[in-house]
Structure formats: C-alpha cells, structure tokens
Amino acid sequence: DGYAADKLFNQGFSFTYDDVIFLPHYIDFPTDAVSLSTRLSRNITLSVPCVSSPMDTVTESYMASAMAAVGAIGIIHSNLTPSQQAQMVRSVKSRRVPVLSNPVVKSRDSRIFDEFDDGSVPCVLVTESGNADSKLMGYVTKADWFGLDDKEMKLVDYMRTTDSKMVVPWSYDLGQIDEQLKQVETDFVVLEKDGGVVDVVSKAEVDRVKGCPKIGKGTVGPDGKWMVGAAIGTRQSDKERLELLVKSGVNAVVLDSSQGNSIYQIEMIRHIKQTYPELDVIGGNVVTMNQAQNLIKAEVDGLRVGMGSGSICTTQEVCAVGRGQATAVYKVSTVASQNGIPVIADGGIKNSGHIVKALVLGASTVMMGNFLAGSTETPGVYESQNGCLIKKYRGMGSLEAMTKGSDQRYLGDTAKLKIAQGVVGMVADKGSILKILPYTMQAVKQGFQDLGAYSLLSAHDLLRSRTLRLEVRTGAAQAEGGVHGLVSYEKKAF
Ligand code: XMP
C-alpha cells in the first residue's frame, strides 16, 4: 500500500511538504515514549530538533537564549557588525534564565534624560564605572526619576543603595531567583558575575517563564553555558568576524549562502577546520545530492537544506533555481546520512505536520523563520493594526535587509546591482516561543507515534527500510486534508 520514499522521490517531480502525506503505521508505545533528541551538527546534540534562523527579524540574543532554554538552538544573524554579533553571543552565554530584560547601567554622575520617558525602562543600575562589568552602587526606579523636580540631578544624589539580597549569582536558576524575589522589596533582582552586572530579572518575567510548559533539557555546552550558533559569510572579512565569535565562545557557525556549493564555501570550511578544529561548521544551503557531496568532502559538520522554500523567498522566481523542500530534504539526507552528517531542513515550515515530514524524510532538525517570527523573543517592536499586534518579518535577500548589509548571502563579490530575492512583510504576534515550542513538539510526537517511530533514528530506519509508505496528495486531497465546509471557525492549536 502506498509508495516507498525512494520510489516516490525518483519520478522527476519536485515535492513540497504539502504535496506528500504519510500513511499511518502501527502504534505500540505512548506519545511520551517518543524522543525527539537529535544532533544539530557532528558534535552538538539537542533535545528539541528546532533551530531559529539567522535572520535579523528572528534571531538575536533573546531568541537564542530562549531556544537554548527549551533544548533547541538559535543562530545569531550576521546583518550587524562583527563586534555586535560577538556581543550577542556573549550575552547568550552569560544567561541562565530565558527572561526578557533590558539592563541599563549608568555612572553615579549621570542624569536621567528624556531617553527613558516612554516608561520602557523600569530601573537604572548605577555602577562605579558606569559600565556593566564594575561594582554595583545603587539603583533608581522609574518612579524615582518621574517624581524628580530637578531633572538635572545626578543619579548619585537620589539613588537607592542596593542591599546584598538584591544581588544574586548569575548561575541562579529560575527557582532560586523566584525565592530571592520573595525576600527583597524591589520587584527585580540583579544577576552578578565576577563583581559585575550580568542582568536584571523582574518578578513579572519570572512569573511569565514559570507559567510555560517544560520540554527538553536546556542546550548546555561543555563550558556549562548555553549553546549558540552564529552565521558568517565566506569573505576575507568573515575570517576576522569568526575570530571574534570564537573568542566569545560560539559553538557552531553557519556559512550563510543561498547556494553553498561554491569554491568560496569550500575554502572557508577548510580554513575553519584548520584554524578551529573544535568548532562545528554548517555548510549550505544545498538541495541536491551533488552539492551535498562536495561540502561533505570538504568535511563540513552539518548541512543546511533549502532553496527558495522560505516564506519570504523569491529565489525560485528570480533565479529559476531551487527545489521542492520535501524532495530536497529527502535527497540530501540520503547522502548525508551515509556520511553521518546531520541535515537541517531550512524554510517552508508552516505547521507541526511539516516538522514531522521534514524529520521523517531524513532531517535531524528544522530551521524556522516564519514559524517563530512575531514571537515575544524576536527583535523589533510590535505595531497595532486593526486591533492586532504585528511585527516585521523580512527576507535577508530583501532590498531592505541588503541595504543594511546582508547582500553577501545573495550576491557574488563583483555584483554591483542589487536584485531582491526576498520580501518584507508583517506577521501577527504569536506569544512566547517558550509556549509555542512545547505545544508544537507535543504535536510532532503524536505524528511520530502515528507512524510507529519512537525516535528520529527509528523514523529514518522505517523510511529507508520501506516500511513507512507515503503518497502524493492531489489538489482535492490537500483541500480535503484542511478544514472545509464551515462558514466560519476559530483556528486555535493550543
Ligand atoms: P521560513 O519559511 O521559515 O524560511 O520563513 C526561512 C528561511 O528562508 C531563507 N531566507 C531567504 N530565502 N530570500 C530567499 O530566497 C530571502 O530573502 C531569504 N531570507 C531568508 C533562509 O534560509 C531562512 O532560514
């Protein structure tokens, strides 16, 4: 009944996730017995098979911290200066709790100017030097500076002194911070390391994070800190960027290119392997077996798969190259698995079913832009439209992003005329990924259970042994597989 994957994917069609459907198999274990633990790359293991995309509207330090906290990983984008990117890596590495915070540190002689008039900064910390890495002297809250008669007063003249209970070691976990918050009068505590300020954690944030379901164990590296990746290009200047990132403790780098099978990328992989043998390097993007083989020969530690499948991509229309994502993932995974190289299925994930398809077809992780865009942890500010909150999500090949510097991903060194390969759009507020991912992973586990697969490896075995069968869905079958025949309904997954 149905088709084996090798037969289905060898007929000259380029299939997307929606084109194909698995036939259910046999269940002999509960959903909770399904393990989704996996590898991002040769040496990095994750308990949750998700990666946030290196896009400037998706992954900066908050997103990467939250991804690591749930057992997944984030890749910091490179559309900023090398030192800014390295700072974001350090910020992830210095956190233990996935809270949103905005520590503002000033010197005793500073004054609070109009900059905080919008109320977005709840408190200002005063340190000896005015920088985060020096001794904490005191603090002022927004009530203090809003109530000031003389706005020219220096912080030292009205700051409150911190009592020792307000300062806790950076290594405190959420439970310990929560306990400490009960013992202080303020609604925040300050995290400290080596005598300097690391972060400010508010009670509201602790309550928010405590209310989220727990999934995998956090992604922690050998240094005991959260793991984080970063994107780089393949130019000479990227070698300097890389050096800074390595010094900041980055765990993996992603060579960010829409067509990764190039001499530039192969040379960069060799450079990284020679200079930083401990660092995992992920190559791509690729969509064919031949492209993958070239990067595997260059000893890449992971492959990123997808060309033109992303929700903001126009590469297939502009350049006439690419591949349906289901076919690309299956084909590349076939060669990658023979060489023990994990595959990241990048782009085109719209629902948990797509994640099941990507993982069962051979990927070890899925990389997501749109699925995470608009969440609390993404960069950017919410705007209001027709009563809904929305946030910007843009392709890194959009003119707007390229103007800021991301043209390397889409242009050759010599190209002078910028052509967009992506668009700029808005997405709805999705809430926190600390909630989205646990629910999504539960749905993915149910999909695995229906297929009789208790792990990624067992799913791959079932597929390659032709035990798992699939079929192509006609247009009508796809329509039937979605909600139909209702005048209106509310789509709520959890
Ligand atoms: P989703 O579907 O998750 O896709 O939004 C995210 C992935 O899309 C790729 N990407 C682009 N591709 N033009 C493209 O052709 C672009 O401007 C662009 N920006 C991102 C990238 O692989 C990302 O992870």
Image (cartoon, rainbow, N blue to C red):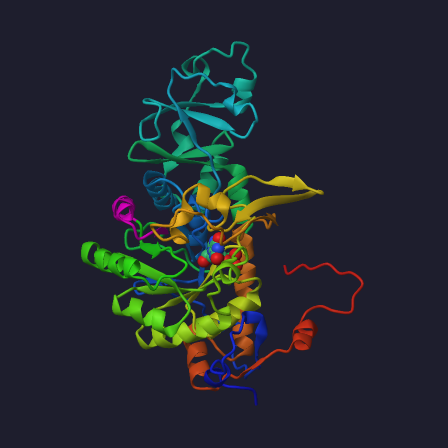
| One can see residue 455 in this view | no
Residue 232 shown in magenta: yes
| One can see residue 183 in this view | yes
Residue 475 drawn at (x, y percent): 66, 75
User: Which residue does the image show at 37% across and 74% down from the upper left?
Assistant: 289
The residue sitting at the right extreme is: 487
Name the residue nearer the viewer: 470 or 9.
Answer: 9
Residue 364 drawn at (x, y percent): 41, 68
Residue 350 shown in magenta: no
User: Which residue does the image show at 44% across and 32% down from the upper left?
Assistant: 103
Give the quadrant of residue 465. Answer: bottom left
Q: Quadrant of the C terminus?
A: bottom right
Does residue 142 lie above or below 307 as drawn? above
What segment is highlighted magenta in the picture? 229-249
Q: Quadrant of the N terminus?
A: bottom right
User: Which residue does the image show at 51% across and 57% down from the upper left?
Assistant: 313
